Amino acid sequence: MHADGAQAVGKIPVAVDDLGVDLLSIAGHKLYAPKGVGALYIRRGVRIAPVVVGAGQEHGIRPGTENVAGIVGLGAAAELAARLLTAEHARQTALRERLWASLAAAVPGLVRISPASDSLPNTLMVAVPNRLGADILDAIDGVAASTGSACHSGVHSPSATLIAMGVPADIALGALRLSLGRSTTADDVDIAAAALGRAAT
């Protein structure tokens, strides 16, 4: 069993034994390590075939010179994330809920997709029914966010994941994924909420 831990590691407690996984992948930049470095946990006794062959580095799984600077950066980022885990979880959860309250007050009919509990503290996914999330983001400056839809040749389609979760297509097309980070402040949240509220109404 493989789990993609990219979004979770550094934001919530992650323990491979608790998850019951044999493999866990980590993307360094998601926890403030340099881009281009990651890690794969492999449970002892699990054998995987290399994607690239030709040398014995990294136990024969990935040949080539290791990115030592990136590896050290990932280790330092992981240590820092572990020290900040509890405090940042609480702080970012409070900011996320502040963002939700402001947006819900400003945008009639706003739908909350990500739950208030048992979710990442730094992520809020909402949807504006009967609107395109991309149109909302195009109408504002100074807020970087993503949508819950894909655009191919000018035709927008709702996220397959949201549809599989049971979110109706007209709501899924209006999805906005808003993320917070260690540098996010209450003022940042208020500014973003005001801008999004104006664009969505």
Image: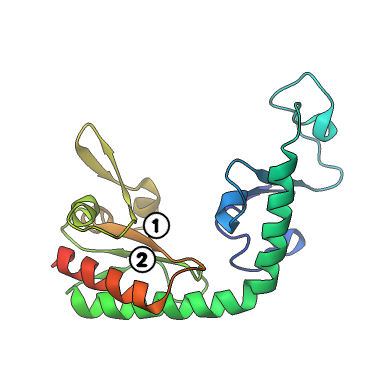
Q: Nearer the viewer, residue 20 or 80?
A: 80
Amino acid type, callout 2: Ile
Q: Residue at x 35, y 77 (%)?
A: 187
Query: How far from the left and from the top, in percent, is residue 164?
Result: 39, 52
User: Which residue occupies the extreme top position in the image?
Assistant: 54
Q: Residue at x 20, y 37 (%)?
A: 155
Q: Which residue matches tag 1?
A: 165
Neighbour tally class for label 1: few under 14, some 14-19, many 20 plus, Cα within 10 Å:
few
Disc 2 and disc 1 in contact, CB within 8 angstroms: yes
Against 179, residue 118 (above or below) is below
Q: Which mark is residue 113?
A: 2
Say whether residue 148 is left or right of residue 37. left
Against 53, residue 135 (above or below) is below
Neighbour tally class for label 2: few under 14, some 14-19, many 20 plus, Cα within 10 Å:
some
CA gap between label 2 and label 1 equals: 10 Å
Amino acid type, callout 1: Met
Q: How is the image coloured?
A: rainbow
User: Which residue occupies the extreme front position in the image?
Assistant: 69
In this orientation, does residue 133 appear?
A: yes
Against 190, residue 44 (above or below) is above
Say whether residue 34 is left or right of residue 68. left
Query: How far from the left and from the top, in percent, is residue 8?
Result: 58, 60
Query: How far from the left and from the top, in percent, is residue 200?
Result: 17, 64
Q: Secondary structure at mark 1?
A: loop
In this orientation, does residue 167 appear?
A: no
Number of numbered markers: 2
Against 38, residue 77 (above or below) is below
Q: Which mark is residue 82?
A: none
Q: Secondary structure at mark 2?
A: loop
State which quadrant residue 70 falls in.
Answer: top right
Q: Which comes before the other along the chain, label 2 or label 1? A: 2
Query: How far from the left and from the top, in percent, is residue 62?
Result: 74, 30
